[in-house]
Image: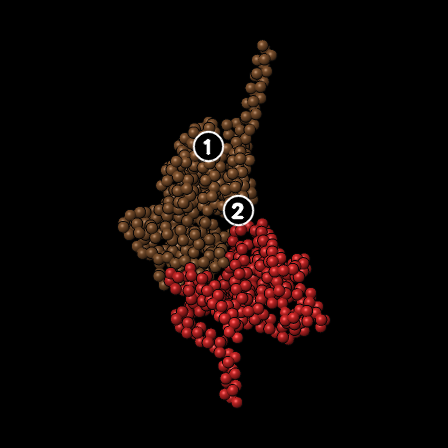
Chain colours: A brown, B red
Amino acid sequence: MRRVFLLAIVLAVMAMMAIAATPIKIGAVVPLGDITGDQASKAMRLAVEEINAAGGVLGRPLELIVIDDELKPEKGAAAIEKLATVDRVDFFVGGMSSGVHLAQIPIMKRYQKITIWIGAASYLCENAVGPTADWYFHLHPWDYQQGESYGRGWSDIVAAYPEITTDRIFLAYEEGGFGTASYDSYIALQKLAAQGEGTWAGVINDFRGESFKSAALGGGDYRAMLQQAKAYNPDLFIWAGYDADALPILQQAKEIGFAPKLFVGAPPGWPAHFGDSPLAEGVTLYGMWAPTLNKVSPVAEHFWNAYIERYKEEPATYFAPLGYTNIYFLVEGIKAAGTIEKAALIKALAELEYDSPIGEVLTISPSNVIKHQGFTAQKILQWQNGEQQVIWPLELKTSEPEYPFPKWEGR
Amino acid sequence: MKDLEKSAFWKKNSKLIYLITAIALLALWRPHAILYGIQRGSLYSLIGLPLSLTLGVVGIMNLAHGDFLSLGIYVSYMFFMNLGVDPLLSIVPVTLILFGVGVLVYKLTITKVLKSGHLNQLLLTFGISMILIESLNVIWTSRPRNVYVPYASSSMTIANFTFGTYELLYVLFAFAVLIGFQLFLKKTRLGQATYAVGQNPRGAKIVGINIGFVYLVVFGVSIAILGIVAGVMLPRSSIFPMVGAPYTMRSFCLVAMAGLGNLPGILISGIVLGIGEAIVQSIPGYSGWSDLVFFGVLIAVISIRSMRRLAL
């Protein structure tokens, strides 16, 4: 009897040790060929290494499996299938392109694993996920939330700095899906504003848009569009294109002598060393994060230093701190729940408050369709002396806005 | 006698005179568009000219043409970043390097498919294109880069008409390359041999011309010319692995519009298409139609030409 009892204890200890050694598997799908996906995956790895070095979570290590979706919907969908069936991961994380995500959502719905997604801003993805998917957490603001947040931002800025006006807005948008969606959302926001509704009410009085062909898609000649913008004489000129358009647009604006009071760029990323160019000075931009947040957020500062130490390169896109947030948000939720059991973890994540390197505390609230939406706003930033400074939210600002946009002479 | 001479001159140059008159009239309506169109059209021609030579003489449909341009732009960028060489000065070393690359690619791959059908040639050059794009992606990532030189955004104002002057270099280089090609083909022994090979390779071989050598030089030179384009484009363009790719299709369009072996036609076609594109872009609300106009003009020209041939 005594021998049987001893054997049972040994077996129980061995079983517990086996469970403890079993890693919690996280499956990530990102486009590794693109800087956003590359840096997001590196930041995820950094977070996993830090957590494992500190003893893991629930006494178990984390294992991160990253698959490249190559920005192709079919590859993104196949990656989710593989992570679910071959790698048998516990959670899905990652994300970038809305087009890729639309192909992944039906497969995610089949497996219904807890998913924390940091990309895919299109409202079409939200509609595809639907209101009943309580296992789905979306951290990036949806496109309509971004548009609303810019309106809130400009309202606050105009109120805080009376010399700044945004009455006449000219939007230059690339003629593909990304730019056209931006144009459509501005039209919708302007209609609301004209009726005295929405966040843009009182900020925008007159609006015009003109398309251009992005350099990324074989274009690169913006002069015809810029001539039209110059003739319109806007208070705020904004272009929605890609990183490849950033400097050529400025060069050509300089060439024709077009210097609006506010020159705003809204690409998903910026070209390498953009801030080093004299043309970048005073350019305003939208983004979730800027390196200068290190000055006001200890979490952002820790992330910045750890990333550079680990990879010997600087995070250059907000998808790096978002990738880091992706892992930590999940792990903090597991800690709070004390288990990876689905219902308990969903509840814990929905109630979690995570101080993120984005500069804000991440909390979950419902959006138009889904139950679990994370961030709801972008920030308004400005290139000043080669650095991105935060000019809105005002409580997070790292510098005063440079206004008006500096003249071209001497640049 | 003078009337006869006049009539012959008119007959020979009437199309060109009509074209110049049309451009002058359009310039009164949209002066910026005409200038931008000539500048951009010259860039298309500058890239299309070497492709026309390869297609006309070697008979290779090089789908990697634009990707060799991307490679040249990256090499020029490296000269600028690492050695501080001005992009326009880097034209000399980049042209030589690309000539070497062209010769190597020709020796290692193109020679193997010279006698194969067009499908094999297309597959081979498509493969080269993929290798070039992915190599650039692996080495430099897809993140765009730029160089800044103040003269690239220089401008001039004449009676309230402000325009950029840098892209006039495209016009200058397009004419220079065209004249260079014409002189090479007509005034040098190798050029005359090239011309003969382009006309009748078998006949050229019978009279003792080393066809393989001619093909090698023509392919190498056509890639080398992209080194000139790379140096001129670098100050005005973002640099990313796919930067040159869209120009391949445009270059094929120019060759189709001008006709095989018609080098001056490439320049004229480029300028006509460039102007068409720029005029559409200058009309508020219609800039998205510029591609449609580009290919519409192309289809119209090819259709009219084929109808004329049928009528003869």
Q: Nearer the viewer, mark 2 or mark 1?
A: 2
Q: Which chain does the numbered disc 1 sit on?
A: A
The numbered dot on residue A332 is: 1
Q: Is residue B28 above or below residue A105?
A: below
Find residue A292 and report its horizontal and vertical position in percent.
Answer: 45, 45
Seen at 67% across and 67% down, the residue is B214
Residue identifier under label 2: A70
Find residue B17 and report its horizontal and vertical position in percent.
Answer: 47, 77
Element under disc 1? helix
Q: Which amino acid, by three-letter code, is at mark 1?
A: Glu
Q: Which chain does the numbered disc 2 sit on?
A: A
For the image, the number of numbered tags is 2
Instruction: Decide which of A201, A257 is in the foreground and name it.
Output: A201
Give left or right: position of B110 versus B169.
right
Element under disc 2? loop
Q: Which amino acid, by three-letter code, is at mark 2?
A: Glu
Q: Is residue A345 above or below residue A320?
A: above
Find residue B67 and report its horizontal and vertical position in percent.
Answer: 57, 58
Seen at 55% across and 23% down, the residue is A16
Instruction: Decide which of A285, A161 is in the foreground and name it.
Output: A285
The numbered dot on residue A371 is: none
Q: Is residue A75 above or below residue B265?
A: above
Find residue A158 and report its horizontal and vertical position in percent.
Answer: 32, 50
Q: Is residue B118 above or below residue B265?
A: above
Q: Quadrant of residue B196?
A: bottom right
Q: Is residue A88 visible in the rendered structure shown here?
A: yes
Seen at 42% across and 53% down, the residue is A179
Pointers 2 and 1 within a single chain: yes
Seen at 56% across and 51% down, the residue is B137
- Outermost residue on the front side: it is B311
